[in-house]
Image (spheres, rainbow, N blue to C red):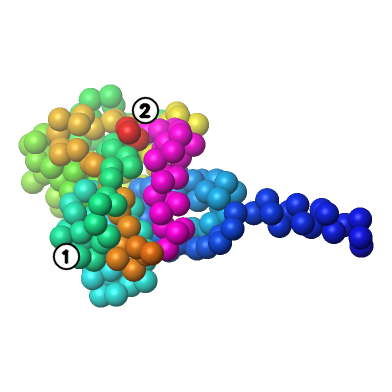
Amino acid sequence: MQRLAPLFASLLFALPAHAGEVSVAVAANFTAPMQKIAAEFEKDTGHRAQLAFGATGKFYAQIAHGAPFEVLLAADDETPARLEHEQLAAPATRFTYAIGKLVLWSPREGYVDDRGEVLTKGDFKHLAIANPRTAPYGTAAVEAMRKLGVFDALQPRFVQGENIAQAYQFVATGNAELGFVALSQVLKDGKLASGSAWPVPASLHAPIRQDAVALARGRHNPAVQALLAYLKGDKARAIIKSYGYDL
């Protein structure tokens, strides 16, 4: 046992002092990258991020009603700004951690063309989108369809998900032939994992600026400060970029 004592001591001192936990509300489009970032964050800092995924609008309502989140990673920049204005977020902590990209995707090879003309020429019955009232990617999809002049014709075919993760599931499971999803959901190792996709031109919708903010409940938690700093670091930024986001 005496010989093991130095080993135990070295392991103890290798861990960061005062390692803690941080409760994070994460926009559904950022599920995969945040899971990877959280694992690296715990490995590098000792702090643990407890993650919940969902629609940004739903998270706003939950936070306004006292939900115990300490950080919000939103799918837009308006919700964190609103929380800041309403004093539900810590001042001077908000920043853009990613700029999202919208794609029209189908699991069928060659079904979605490189101009998105399938929207007017396709024989599909169902088109999946996220709820535009609560999910910024849904809002962007509606903006794009309006600019393309196809919204009214396509609206009867909508299959609406509560968030972008549910919209993706509708397409992936065949409940919709195609849908507007986040680019991050259909990439693997920087390439389209399956099917066919049309990256929606940024000119067709407002930029999907995704902001992070510390919430009032977490303003004094060192793990909150550590996570926000980690998101700005090289390792996290490389992960974010690998999922197709701009920085």
Closer to the eye: label 1 or 2: 1
32, above or below 21, in the image:
above
Going from the N terminus, do you reach mark 1 or mark 2 first?
1
Marks 1 and 2 sit apart, C-alpha to C-alpha, by 47 Å
Q: Quadrant of the N terminus?
A: bottom right
Amino acid at the residue labelled 1: Glu
x and y, in percent, of residue 82 in the image: 17, 58
Relative to residue 135, is residue 15 drawn left or right?
A: right
Pick the front one: 37 or 124? 37
x and y, in percent, of residue 181 in the image: 31, 43
Which quadrant holds residue 208? Answer: top left
13, above or below 105, in the image:
below
Q: Residue furthest top?
A: 114
Q: Are marks 1 and 2 in contact (CB under 8 Å)?
A: no
Q: Residues within 10 Å of mark 1 (few under 14, many from 20)?
A: few
Amino acid at the residue labelled 2: Gly
Which quadrant holds residue 218? Answer: bottom left
Q: Which residue is mark 2?
A: 110
Magenta residues (range):
221-244
Q: Is residue 243 magenta?
A: yes
Q: Residues within 10 Å of mark 2 (few under 14, many from 20)?
A: few
x and y, in percent, of residue 223 in the image: 46, 58
Pick the front one: 125 or 53? 53
Q: Is residue 113 visible?
A: yes
Q: Quadrant of the C terminus?
A: top left
Q: Is residue 160 magenta?
A: no
Q: Is residue 179 visible?
A: no
